[in-house]
Amino acid sequence: MKNQVKIIGSPMDLGADRRGVDMGPSVVRIAGLSQKIKALGYQVEDLGNIPVKLAEMVTKNAINAKYLDEIAEANEVLATQVSEILESDSLPVVLGGDHSIAIGSVSGVASYYKAKEQRIGIIWIDAHLDSNTPETSLSGNVHGMPLAILLGYGPKELTHIGGFAPKVRPEDCVVIGVRDVDPGERDLARSIGLKVFTMRDLDELGMSRVMDEAIDIASRYTVGFHATFDIDFVDPTYAPGVGTPVSGGGTYRESHLAMEKIFDSGKALSIELTEINAVLDIENRTGKLGADLILSALGKKIM
């Protein structure tokens, strides 16, 4: 893994109905992220946040993909920033914001490696499948669509950020921790052969085996993978500050083990953390956990 880290935040909350995830980047920073990464031996630069319009400034311009234009605009900027971080021989650490930011972060990584004629994979750790389209979404919230968009399904304004689609192939992607799935996204995932490890799979196989298989799938035919961690993967007992909590999630140690295995693989091209809702948190417990999970993905160990 690279020895220089650059942090970039996307205070995006247009993709979700519940306000508060725009403060996610701030609460992870408040937990001492930069200083703790430096203590691991990295050079660290925090680039601040990209500009994202406030919901009060705009209207929901598409009922089946709310705030489509504004989300596309912000993700274009994020994609450019992530590509520039990679060009500087640094590791991007992206802080959200709702999970629609993955459209921009993955687009940036994919664009950088596409220029080198290489493809990337994704490890997507989440309670939700995030594979709806405007046609299947029950809410019209874009944070429920980013994986489908990156696979080429959805509005062209989002699928073609960077000028090409898809950003990734289904055979290079793995979703881990799913326990809340809509019918339309289930149908899409099955039809394209997307590998999904549900919470039952984690119960039966264990996190170590699931991560070994996921890393193999996401890196088998690729230069490496983008690792994106939606904090609602973690059971609400440990992570109360989320907008869409689902009981029966990952434990504290399962979450850290997943990130530790990502570091051990040496295949992570970028790290992303999303969906911390500061309004719903308790004494920044979820913000602190988010910072610690990033540290595990960067090599922090117990011994």
Image: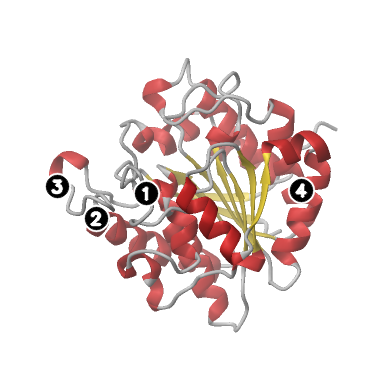
Residue denoted by label 4: 211
Mark 2 to mark 1: distance in Å?
A: 19 Å
Q: In this view, does 240 lie above or below 28?
A: above
The image position of residue 28, as x and y in percent, is 49, 33
Residue denoted by label 1: 137
Mark 4 to mark 3: distance in Å?
A: 41 Å
Q: Which amino acid does label 2 sit on?
A: Glu
Q: What element carries label 4?
A: helix
Q: Is mark 2 on a helix, strand or loop?
A: helix
Task: Report the front residue among 103 and 89.
Answer: 103
Task: Give the number of the disc on residue 59.
Answer: 3
- Whichever of callouts 4 and 3 sits on the residue coming sooner in the sequence is 3
Task: State the colouring used for the structure image.
Answer: secondary structure
- Whichever of callouts 1 and 3 sits on the residue coming sooner in the sequence is 3
Left or right, 2 with reference to 20: right
Left or right, 70 with reference to 194: left
Task: Report the front residue among 24 and 228.
Answer: 228
Residue denoted by label 2: 70
Could you tell me if residue 155 is visible in this image? yes
Mark 2 to mark 3: distance in Å?
A: 10 Å
Name which residue lies at 40% across and 73% down.
Answer: 162
- Whichever of callouts 2 and 3 sits on the residue coming sooner in the sequence is 3
In the rendered structure, are the residues bearing label 2 and label 4 in contact, judged by CB atoms less than 8 Å apart? no
The image position of residue 22, as x and y in percent, is 35, 37
Which mark is nearer the camera, 4 or 1? Answer: 1
Name which residue lies at 49% across and 28% down.
Answer: 245
Task: Give the number of the disc on residue 10.
Answer: none
- Tell me if mark 4 has few (under 14), some (14-19) or many (20+) residues whose alpha carbon lies within 10 angstroms of its own: many
Q: What residue type is labelled 4?
A: Met
Left or right, 58 with reference to 249: left
